[in-house]
Image: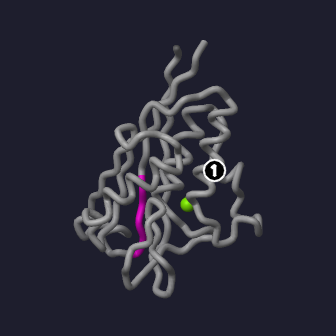
Amino acid sequence: MSIATGIGYDCHRLVEGRRLVIGGVEIEHTHGLLGHSDADVLTHAIIDALLGAAGLGDIGQHFPDTDERYRDADSLELLRACAAMLRRAGAEVEHVDATVVLERPKLAPVRDQIRTTLAAALGVSESRLNVKATRGEGMGFIGRAEGAAALAVATISHEP
Ligand code: MG
């Protein structure tokens, strides 16, 4: 069995009048993330980590933000499509770990829901997917709550 890892990073601007969707869960807040799709920063970082591990390029290649099909897209659908791509390539998701960097609101109350939602979309048990959250401590664009970022690392296996 061969093992491969991939890294993913994403960031989106926080603006008034948008839904805040993180890891497929809509969170009540004054601001939401701006983007062509639902701008689910966490799901996008995880997709990039998975594609990276599988050597399948990046999210922009498969789901371009210039494509009208992906306007306001549910990023969980993109994650499901990504999981299907990996399966077709003979890859199994061993583990995903991710960190959301967001000044507010606190993600602790919805972290378990995010984990359940993402694991289901990816088709893995929750023990294979971990989500963490941290803040910008008042520094930079995240600390000023101008935007949010997410990082992810995915580990996949291939049978020889
Ligand atoms: Mg994105």
- Against 15, residue 107 (above or below) is above
Report if residue 147 lies within the magenta region: yes
Report if residue 144 lies within the magenta region: no
Residue that sits furthest to the left in the current view: 137
Q: Residue at x 38, y 85 (%)?
A: 30
Whole-percent x, y for residue 41 in the image: 48, 61
> Colour mode?
one colour
Local secondary structure at mark 1: helix
Q: Which residue is drawn at 30% across and 69% down?
A: 103
Q: In which quarter of the image is the C terminus?
A: top right
Q: Which residue is drawn at 58% across and 60% down?
A: 75
Q: Which amino acid does the dot numbered 1 rest on? A: Ile
Q: Main secondary structure of the magenta part?
A: strand
Whole-percent x, y for residue 6 in the image: 50, 35
Mark 1 highlights which residue?
59
Q: Residue at x 37, y 81 (%)?
A: 29
Which region shows up in magenta? 146-150
Apparent side of residue 106 relative to residue 17 in the rendered image (left or right): left
Mark 1 CB lies closer than 8 A to ligand 1: yes
Q: What is the crowding at mark 1: few (fewer than 14 residues within 10 Å), some, or many (at least 20)?
A: many
Whole-percent x, y for residue 120 in the image: 48, 49
